[in-house]
């Protein structure tokens, strides 16, 4: 059952009731279910949404997130990318892709993570919760293996590493052991206000191919992929690897310049 799986994960990552948890809400089912369950279990949560300014789709996502936070009676912070960075995600991505050959989701992911960490720190949050589910995680892990770069999964897991760094807000994934299908059913049963459409820019054909392959596997196999990942990760790298700070923006990074500044050409 979904609630038991989430409780087990929470216990594993040692979440405390007094901690302030910022739930990263996209407008989709996964983050909405994460938020609903953390609230139900009595955690101190607030919502955080990045308005990516991708016209109609972003308007629908914002409305869903506002409805959810109103229904759950939690505070919502909205970061408007157009206001804060001067342009919407489509424009930013186009600008980056004119110089670097990178997939849409990869760019969007780097930008969202950078914003989330900085804003969560500003809001004095102890943790950021995202809606990543078992399918997402197993899929990313397999993709990293297929690409020959399993080390890219080093920061995966139900809780991020680097939790010891003062500028890094730990990210947690309460749905880590919950298959996507179970999340969808639960969200529909609770009639949560969410957008079920996929992001119109998620056009990475390789990811779609891996997702289609994963969909042929039973949940038990997907869970085994994650369990193997955890066993492998336990053997490589230290839990609290030292990070340094980006010489351009000051955000935590393992390199001299963070991925965000690298994308923005701020080297
Ligand atoms: P995605 O990378 O789109 O698969 O989303 C993974 C998780 O990141 C979601 O479950 C949310 O927790 C978070 N997230 C994605 N998009 C946004 C957004 N626009 N604003 C806030 N959080 C987001
Ligand atoms: Zn930087």
Image (cartoon, helix red, strand yellow):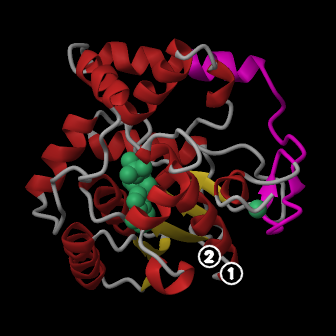
Marks 1 and 2: CB-CB under 8 Å? yes
- In magenta segment, residue 44: no
In depth, the one of 115 and 28 nearer the eye is 115
Q: Which mark is residue 119?
A: 2
Quadrant of ligand 2 in image: bottom right
Is 43 situated above or below 10?
below
Q: Can the viewer see residue 115 in this picture?
A: yes
- In magenta segment, residue 247: yes
Is 115 situated above or below 265?
below
- Residue wearing tag 1: 122
Residue 33: x, y in percent?
Answer: 29, 57
Mark 2 secondary-structure assignment: helix
In depth, the one of 126 and 27 nearer the eye is 27
In depth, the one of 151 and 38 nearer the eye is 151
- The residue at the point 47 percent across, 22 percent down is 143
Q: Quadrant of the C terminus?
A: bottom right
Residue 89: x, y in percent?
Answer: 42, 65
- The residue at the point 62 percent across, 70 percent down is 19
In depth, the one of 240 and 2 nearer the eye is 240
């Amino acid at each position: 059952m979904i609630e038991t799986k989430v409780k087990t994960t929470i216990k594993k990552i040692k979440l405390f009731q007094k901690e302030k948890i910022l739930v990263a809400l996209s407008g989709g089912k996964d983050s909405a279910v994460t938020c609903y369950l953390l609230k139900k279990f009595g955690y101190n949560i607030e919502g955080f949404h990045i308005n990516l300014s991708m016209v109609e789709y972003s308007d629908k996502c914002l409305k869903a997130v506002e409805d959810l936070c109103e229904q759950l009676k939690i505070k919502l912070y909205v970061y408007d990318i157009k206001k804060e960075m001067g342009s919407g995600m489509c424009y930013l991505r186009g600008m980056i892709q004119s110089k670097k050959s990178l997939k849409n989701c990869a760019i969007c992911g780097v930008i969202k993570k950078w914003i989330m960490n900085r804003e969560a720190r500003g809001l004095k949050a102890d943790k950021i919760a995202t809606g990543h589910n078992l399918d997402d995680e197993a899929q990313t892990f397999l993709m990293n293996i297929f690409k020959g770069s399993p080390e890219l999964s080093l920061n995966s897991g139900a809780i991020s590493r680097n939790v010891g760094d003062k500028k890094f807000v730990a990210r947690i994934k309460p749905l880590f052991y919950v298959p996507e299908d179970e999340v969808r059913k639960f969200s529909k049963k609770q009639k949560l206000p969410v957008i079920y459409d996929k992001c119109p820019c998620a056009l990475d054909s390789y990811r779609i191919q891996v997702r289609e392959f994963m969909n042929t596997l039973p949940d038990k196999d997907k869970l085994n992929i994650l369990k193997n990942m955890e066993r492998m990760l336990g053997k490589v790298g230290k839990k609290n690897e030292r990070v340094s700070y980006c010489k351009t923006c000051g955000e935590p990074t393992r390199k001299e310049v963070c991925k965000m500044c690298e994308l923005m050409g701020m080297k």
